[in-house]
Image (tube, rainbow, N blue to C red):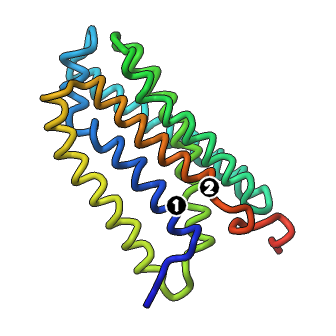
Amino acid sequence: MFKPNYLILKLISSDFFLYAGWGLISPVFAIFMTEQIKGGTLETVGLAVALYWIVKSTLQPFFAHHMDKVKGEKDDLSYLKKGMIITTAIPLLYIFAFNVWHVFLLEIFRGVGMAMVVPAWFGMFTRHIDRNWEAYTWSLQSTALGYAFGVAAVLGGVMAAFIGFRAIFFLVFLLNAFSTLLLYYIREDSIIAPEDVD
């Protein structure tokens, strides 16, 4: 019976809570922008989403290039933790957002954080994936994210109606904080040391 290795399980678990958190707010983000944010319109929703993706997509090749140049995985794990700290702070700051420019700024910083997280996560996952179980291991990752997004989408819509957006953002913060905390329990001996790289 296949059992994913220690680091793969930690990475999947961390990702599950990260995306479960953001999954709570993603289905109702447009409503939050247009009803709770001064100057918020459907156009500004699109711009906020675009800012996140453009910043993330522009920066992540530069972070990834640096990770690949440095031997070992200590730098990858460091980027992953730092990016997660930035990403975790964003939903907490959303509680105090009232103007469109607050949202734009937060989405830019979220883009920076995720530009560190994504290449670091994928690099470590790729190097530690179990040989001959690649498809199955990736399916576990995809399944975990599918459940995280699916359940969170339903809960997010219901919770927005009953407890409000700012309470949801606090819950997103808690889930992201737990996701980040899991990374700090990754054992030193489970990552690739510089001297182990050819």
Closer to the camera, 36 or 104? 36
C-alpha span from label 1 to label 2? 11 Å
What is the count of numbered marks?
2
Q: Residue at x 50, y 43 (%)?
A: 57
Q: Quadrant of residue 128?
A: bottom right
Q: Amino acid at mark 1?
A: Leu
Percent x, y for residue 179?
48, 48
Q: In the rendered view, would you say 129 is above or below 72?
A: below
Q: Quadrant of residue 121?
A: bottom right
In the picture of the structure, the residue carrying the numbered disc 2 is 185
Identify the secondary structure beneath mark 2: loop
The tag on residue 99 is: none
Q: Residue at x 48, y 54 (%)?
A: 14
Percent x, y for residue 13?
45, 59
Q: Residue at x 36, y 29 (%)?
A: 170
Left or right of 133 on screen, residue 96: left
For the C terminus, give its image quadrant.
bottom right
Q: Residues within 10 Å of mark 2 (few under 14, many from 20)?
A: few
Left or right of 68 on screen, residue 184: left
Closer to the camera, 39 or 14? 14
Tag 1–tag 2 contact (CB < 8 Å) = no
Closer to the camera, 36 or 65? 36
Q: Earlier in the sequence, mark 1 or mark 2?
A: 1
Percent x, y for residue 137?
44, 76
Identify the secondary structure beneath mark 1: helix
Q: Amino acid at mark 2?
A: Tyr
Left or right of 154 on screen, residue 84: right
Percent x, y for residue 93?
44, 22
Q: In the rendered view, would you say 137 is above or below 176?
A: below
Q: In the rendered view, would you say 133 is above or below 171?
A: below
Q: In the rendered view, would you say 39 is above or below 135?
A: above
In the picture of the structure, the residue carrying the numbered disc 1 is 11
